[in-house]
Amino acid sequence: MKGQMSLLVKGIYLILVLITIAIVINRITSLQLTSAQQERALRQRAKADSLLQTLAGNVNCLAYEEKGNLESKVLELSSHRLLDKKKLDDFSSQFSDIQPSCARDFSSGYRVKVETFLVNVSSVESSAKGGVFWDILPLINGKKVVFVLDVSGSMADPGGKCDVDVRKNTKICCLKLFMYGFIDEMSEDSEIAVFPFGDQNRCNPQLLFPFTKLDGASTREDLKNRISVLSPYDGTPMSSGLQKGFEYALANGGEAIVLLTDGQENMCIPPTSVDVANNYKYTGIPVYTVAYGSEADVRILQEVASITGGMFFDARTCEELVSKPKEKVEAIIPPMVWEFGDLEFSEREALRSTISVSIPIDVFVDESTRIPGKMSITLADGDLEEFRGFLDKSCLTGKDFQDSFSFHYPISLEQTTSEKKLCLEISGKKVCQKLACSKTIDFSSLTPGSYRIYSKNEDNVLKVIV
């Protein structure tokens, strides 16, 4: 009996020792995992900080570039964390769904948001030559330019201070002031033509006047008189107006198009204005788009400008469209927001980590206006980000690589002549990231699992070998 008790006690001790060992091992493992997670978080934080500093401090990215004089020498200066509004406008258009080329990351995905704070402005003296008009003028001066102008019904709405038309302070009044400015200020070797679009001619906008050289005072006065008869009328066939503008420019040696609208295309579609821009992208004719007022379809105008190699401009009021010199104003500058970078990230098991970081910034609007705000970045690491970076790195550098990958969900490539997207299929939906690679990629899809993958560049093809 005593021997049996002794064996029982020894058995209990042995079990307790094994349990203690298991607890210690689990504790050590837990500490190691926690340490590894902390190290990863620190690396992610450092990368996010580095990307923000690059975007904010590099003139090739968003930094405002100033010029100064030192001992009679002109120097280019970059102000730390002072962002250029024009560059922000361009980034939010050009890189709306992809990482910008000046700060591309080949192992992580990220999206950036820049937002300004509400600012009260009192007695600000605007520059003698401000507004969208003065931004566009040097881009088109001396060229053959087609103006595609919105004369839909909403152009009769209030639009800011304007007295050059019987409809004072309306958008159509400001549109005329805008055009009078170009007729007055463009050089004598410039030629302009005008296509108004509205519901009056529905899907067939008519040429107001053909290319006319601005070679004399009488010619300029005659063109102003023709502009003065424009009148708002119902719907907005913007794509038809843009189509006519391209056709006319292509047939008559046009070198640029200026498209102004205060609304959204609501008739004669398809094709949309984006479709038209894609159809005529090959011509190399840039479209300078202007969103006038708060109801204009900014996204479409940004896409049209980006596709054609033009620029997008935003004017909420007549004063922003055509500013007057030395004018005192009392105003509130509303918050502004810009976003760019990857639209989607890996999800669920395919996502290893995310981190969000913000820094304070100022936005340079003009010489008298700098608005405080913040720039935030959300950085993600996962299956999609890692493989997308692998493909882009090989494609853009022209080098061949090999690496191991594990995919938790099916992964596939969607590619057209204009863009390529790498996608994970998660619970019946696709999560995708756009690639910067312009080559044809020889890759279809893979099922979940672990793979050793090789990339090989051959002429204009990137081969993906599994």
Image: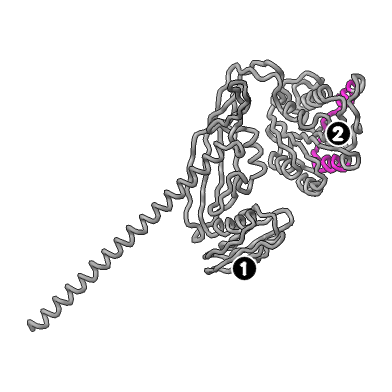
* Residue 66 pos. (x, y %): 61, 28
* Residue 104 pos. (x, y %): 58, 48
Q: Are marks 1 and 2 in contact (CB under 8 Å)?
A: no
The residue positioned 56% from the left and 62% from the top of the image is: 426
Query: Which residue is identified by label 1?
Result: 465
Give the quarter of the image for residue 147. Answer: top right
Query: Which residue is identified by label 2?
Result: 144
Q: Is residue 317 left or right of residue 430?
A: right
Q: Which disc, if any, is residue 394?
A: none
Q: From what the image shows, is residue 73 above or below residue 426?
A: above
Give the quarter of the image for residue 124. Answer: top right
The residue positioned 69% from the left and 59% from the top of the image is: 415
Q: From what the image shows, is residue 455 above or below residue 309?
A: below
Which residues are drawn in magenta? 220-247
Q: Earlier in the sequence, mark 1 or mark 2?
A: 2
Give the quarter of the image for residue 70. Answer: top right
Q: Is residue 257 left or right of residue 406?
A: right
Residue 158: tell me if it is visible. Answer: no
Q: Is residue 155 left or right of residue 441?
A: right
